[in-house]
Image: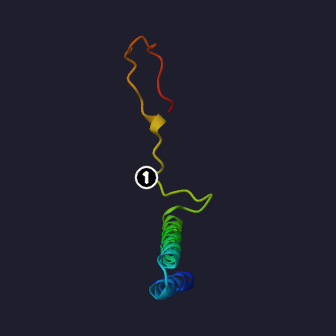
Amino acid sequence: MPNNQTTKFRREAEECRRNAEQAMNLIERGSWLRLADDFMKLARTEDDLRMKIVGLKRLRDFTATVTPARGELPPPGAPTRLNLFAVTVPTVPHRGRPSHWRFRQ
């Protein structure tokens, strides 16, 4: 669903194309067609921006429903953030590393 700005840019592009059809010489016709092309680029950019904003709003709403509020603890046994440093590594020496080196827990 295009917004008012996108519709305005598309109307301007159509008017520029009509003016290009009525132009008397090639230079004027080319100028009108380039201007129409620029208006269509503005319309596409406006549409892309609107779609990105809609997507970001949906993402924000989704994360608001999934993420617990600040200070609220998840129920026991519920999955939490993955801590990559919680993995325990065997204490077998590896390539000259001291055997007491481990990842943080």
Q: Against 92, is 83 above or below?
A: below
Q: Against 46, is 69 above or below?
A: above
Residue on which disc 1 sits: 79
Looking at numbered disc 1 in the image, what kind of residue is underneath it? Pro
Q: Nearer the viewer, residue 56 or 22?
A: 22
**Residue in the picture at 47% in, 24% down:** 102
Circle 1 — which element?
loop
Provide residue 66's location: percent of width, then percent of height. 48, 64
**Residue in the picture at 53% in, 81% down:** 9
Count the numbered circles shown.
Answer: 1
Residue lying at the far right of the rendered structure: 71
Provide residue 33's location: percent of width, then percent of height. 47, 77
**Residue in the picture at 50% in, 33% down:** 105
Provide residue 32's location: percent of width, then percent of height. 51, 79
* Dot 1 crowding, Cα within 10 Å, few <14, some 14–19, many 20+: few
Residue lying at the far top of the rendered structure: 96
Q: Quadrant of the N terminus?
A: bottom left
Q: Nearer the viewer, residue 1 or 39?
A: 39
Provide residue 24's location: percent of width, then percent of height. 49, 85
